[in-house]
Amino acid sequence: MSSEKPTNSSRRALLKAGAVIGAISGAGLKLKPAGAAPPVPVAPLSREVKYQALGVGRERADGMLKIQGGARYAIEHNQDNMVYGVIVQSTIASGTISGIDSTEASNYPGVLAVYSHQDNLKLNPAKVFLKGGAATEAFTPIQDNKVKFNGQHIAIVIAETFEQATHAASLVRVTYQPTEAILQPEDTRTKPQPIDALNVEWGNAHQAMDAAAVVVRSTYTTPRNYNAPIEPHACIASWKDDEMTVWEPTQWVGGARQVVSEWMGISIEKVRIISPFTGGGFGSKVSPHAHVALACLASRELGRPVKVSLTRQQTFSGYGGRPRTHQELSLGARADGTLVSIVHKGWNETSIDDVHLEPTNSVTPIMYACDNVWARHSIIPVNTVNPGWMRAPGENPSTFALEVAMDELAYELNMDPLELRMRNWADHDHKMKKPWSTRRLREAYRAGAEAFGWSARTPAPGSMRRGRELIGWGMAAGTYPILRSPAEARVIIYRNGQIDVESGGVDIGTGTYTILAQTVAEVLGVSSRQINVRLGDTSLPRSPLAGGSQLANVLTGAVHKTASALKERLITLAIALPSSPFYQSERSAVSVSDGQVYLQRRPGNGITFARLLELADRDFVDAKENTYKPGASEQDRYDAAHTFTQIQMPDAFETSSHSWSAQFVEVAVDEDFGTVRVKRMVGAFDSGRVYNPRLAESQWIGGMVMGLGQALLEEGMLDPRDGRVTNASFADYVVSVNADVPDIKAISVGIPDLQASALGGKAVGELGIVGVAAAISNAVFHATGKRVRDLPVTLDKLI
Ligand code: MCN
Ligand code: MOS
């Protein structure tokens, strides 16, 4: 990525001042109250601020490129001789294709080919992640005449222009022999499959429930949700000299490379994935989907680059969103609020012959202390596109049920919901029977409650009206686990002084470019604005996925190690080079900072990195490092970058590491119309050490906004006659927009957790959404006395 113009100096000065004050108050120094003017602190600029290094909320490194159109997304990499593919989707949910008549389409001007199952173009199914691969679904398009869901890709039309391909696609005539589809998990013909690996059980939960003084028992449901990234799914595939290059917006170039090589039956070295920018994915771009397979097939057949962009409508069945979930949850407690039993049974829908898991019982066993817990999860296959990951898969619905149930219990007990949560504080991980690494959830409760003004809440439903509006205050807790994977990195200093960082990891809008520059700045003592970061290409050092909110911790760790190795290399060069002023100096006497190598006792006499390279007559000096475990085989290294098998969950460590949060929400409900508006949101987050407060805040807020959409607006709908998604557009599948976004505040309460990650950070990306829907539903109960357990909370459920 090219370096951007410096921001104007006044703005920078302000930023610096802000960061200094932040650092002072963070260090616990008391600023004098107003009155006599306090002495102005003339603290020297901290190292972080000076170099805009980790810990400083500097602006996004790729911000200018994005604003000015310099950031080129996948399908903006137009190729010479490129053609366009438009996909034809099935219009039934189950059955067989009895005929495809593509005569008219083929004869249309500009059309080069219409490919369907009749052409016998072979694609191998890619290995799915649950079996140690990288794919989200085993489904491969146009391999046979079977239709398993409405909106399945059944043909692709290739033409010289996009318009020609679009029109020709409408001319393809398909006839079907439909069979009866199973569309909804409630259908009595479904065959639920218990997932025993997700069973949780200790104590005797059923017995303890029977004996409990107070019991709340309810059913909670969440509908199909869609990821809805601003950049729709679209790619360019180019087959040339027996090699496949794909410009694909992805969360993981290594996974995409693996999947494409499996589909095409070619060795991995023959596949290159390029993904410098991704316009959001929220889980849907972890692995490539069926349209990418079609683009690759067509390019190989025609020997020309092929661009395939799904229309927004097609994205609603081109990959799955969050599946429907259903949870029966019972909480048993003593009269003083102590939980004595949790019994939890849930399911999620999956496609008819692929497995997708949305574990509804992931949070229930760990959030609170409880001696008796029983939890089960099943999947129910239906005729749908295979569902996929969407921000906090599992934790999201699990927390919705648990945190609404806790609110119900609080009302049963006549107790403040916050107090009930404190009463059931889990001082260790009861599931793993391990201590937490850090758990600043109490701090999150306190900071969130204080910023929100929770103590002014009157508990009775309907007791806080404002004119015609019923005001409700609700809260919920949230969590997300720390995932860990190894990665590689390279840092290079060139003779002209340029410093580059290279990683195959991606920035999907999160801030990877920025925090990796800040990591090198911390180590080498150079402004992060002078460091170029190159990401998102399988030709760069290998990286795991931007998923499971792991990438920031994974890559800052790898880059820090690499930059430190490079620093040592610079010192070695400086003391070994006869022409260097530090020739034969004591190693410990030489330091690196301010873009210079210098003797600690004579800091003014340093030489720049560029000068050192010139003296050494070298074009560059670099370091390549990795964070593989000692003795990792080449297979392990390969797997870490191309499969899910090397990801470590909290249970692999001596302490259990999770991020934690507390969400507080104010809603206003119109008494007559039942319309719900969120007025204020406060989230307090324990994500450990925060690498860039501004970016982390933007992530947390982004999650809260997405949670608001989930709570009040988002619900995928199917036509009961044919299984078509009836609201497959942004006009009908409504996500939250600026007008829905209230006064939102995100507070960090984390402290560095060196057991969770190399540099002390914990997860950020998915944490912000967890618990939001529960807090909103709880606030609506407080406002109206109506308990909504089925998302979204729409007005029909309130009047
Ligand atoms: N960060 C930080 N301090 C930390 C950890 C993270 O300042 N201790 C900040 C950094 O700016 C970092 C960002 O938070 O770039 C996200 O870091 P992390 O939590 O490690 O998440 P990933 O980089 O692995 O990104 C994936 C994550 C997931 S899994 C989903 S889903 C999601 C999310 O990020 N999808 C997103 N946030 C998204 N944001 C955007 N804009 N688009 C998506 O598709
Ligand atoms: Mo995030 S749903 O783990 O990509």
Image (cartoon, helix red, strand yellow):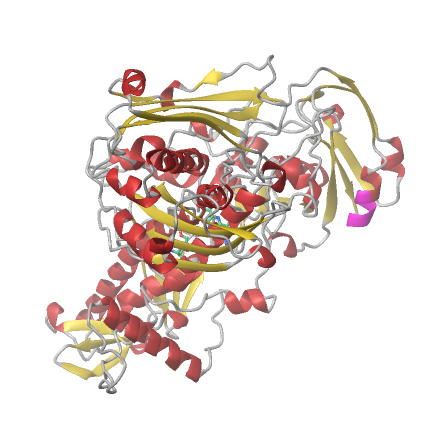
Q: State the quadrant of the C terminus.
A: top right
Answer with left or right where residue 135 lies relative to residue 753: right
Residue 368, x across and y down, in percent: 28, 35
Residue 534 occupies quadrant: bottom left
Question: Depth check: 471 or 625 in front?
Answer: 471
Q: Which residue lies at the image location 83% right of the left edge and 38% below the top edge?
A: 170
Res 542 seen here: no
Q: Is residue 159 magenta?
A: no
Residue 695 seen in this snapshot: yes
Question: Vertically, is 27 above or below 187?
Answer: below
Left/right placement of residue 797 relative to residue 395 reads: right
Q: Main secondary structure of the magenta part?
A: helix
User: Which of the two residues, 566 or 560, is positioned nearer the viewer here?
Assistant: 560
Which percent across, then down, holds residue 695? 42, 61
Highlighted range, magenta: 162-166
Left or right of 79: which side holds 118? right
Q: Is residue 17 above or below residue 185?
A: below
Q: Nearer the viewer, residue 91 or 129?
A: 91
Q: Position of residue 628 (x, y in %)?
A: 29, 43
Q: Horizontal and vertical percent for residue 91?
A: 75, 28
428 relative position to 101: left or right: left
- Say how many tags the image has: 0
